[in-house]
Image: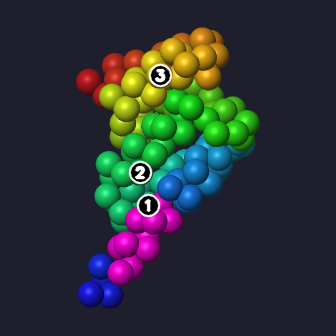
Amino acid sequence: MVADAAGGAAGDAAPFYAKRLLRRVADGGSKLRMTFAVACLEALSLAVGGKRVAAELSRLVADPPDESVAKLGHDGVELLVRTQLLSLPELDAGLAKALVTGRAQPARASWAAAAAATARRRRR
């Protein structure tokens, strides 16, 4: 019973922490800092169920809520895809929706798609 309550509380907090950790990845800095933030995202994903965290991260990357997440670079997207923290179908759908509604810049969508494609090729 306690585990269920803790899991529910962790599940409710997951999007908040996922966004904060994604900002750390977007800030760049040293490779160690980015790798640590991604490792924390992986731990969060394992704790609350990977699909929920992957869906939230994909939504944030496709349609960033603020400038701190918007500056996520090609390397950051590739790292998230390689570690399977981004849901590629949801990322593709989110990028397409953002382009259709005019919320995303075409350049941003193209490099995000390129990073996802690069990571797909490397996983094979």
- Disc 1 is placed on an element classified as helix
Q: Position of residue 34 (x, y in %)?
A: 60, 46
Label whose residue precedes the other's in the sequence (3 or 2): 2
Q: Do callouts 1 and 2 mark residues in contact (Cβ within 8 Å)? A: yes
Question: From the viewer's perspective, is residue 109 above or below residue 39?
Answer: above
Measuring 48% from the left and 43% from the top, which residue is drawn there? 57
Can you say which quadrant of the picture contains the N terminus? bottom left
Out of 31 and 26, give the one closest to the viewer: 26
Q: Which residue is mark 3?
A: 97
Residue at 41% across, 38% down: 86
Q: Position of residue 71 (x, y in %)?
A: 69, 32
Kindly give the residue lying farthest to the front in the view shown.
Answer: 101
Whether residue 1 is visible = yes
Q: Which residue is mark 1?
A: 44
Report the amino acid beneath label 2: Val
- The magenta stretch is 5-14
Is 13 covered by the magenta stretch? Answer: yes
Mark 1 or 2: in front is 2
Q: Secondary structure at mark 2?
A: helix
In space, the residues marked 3 and 1 are separated at their CA atoms by 27 Å
Q: Residue at x 35, y 81 (%)?
A: 5
* Residue 100 inside the magenta-drawn segment: no
How far apart are labels 1 and 2 at the CA level?
A: 8 Å
- For residue 53, which numbered disc appears in the image? 2
Are the residues flagged by discs 3 and 1 in contact, CB closer than 8 Å?
no
- Amino acid type at circle 1 is Leu
Q: Amino acid at mark 3?
A: Lys
Q: Earlier in the sequence, mark 1 or mark 2?
A: 1
Mark number displayed over residue 23: none
Few, some or many residues within 10 Å of mark 2 (<14, 14–19, 20+): many
Mark 3–mark 2 distance (CA, rounded to whole Å): 20 Å
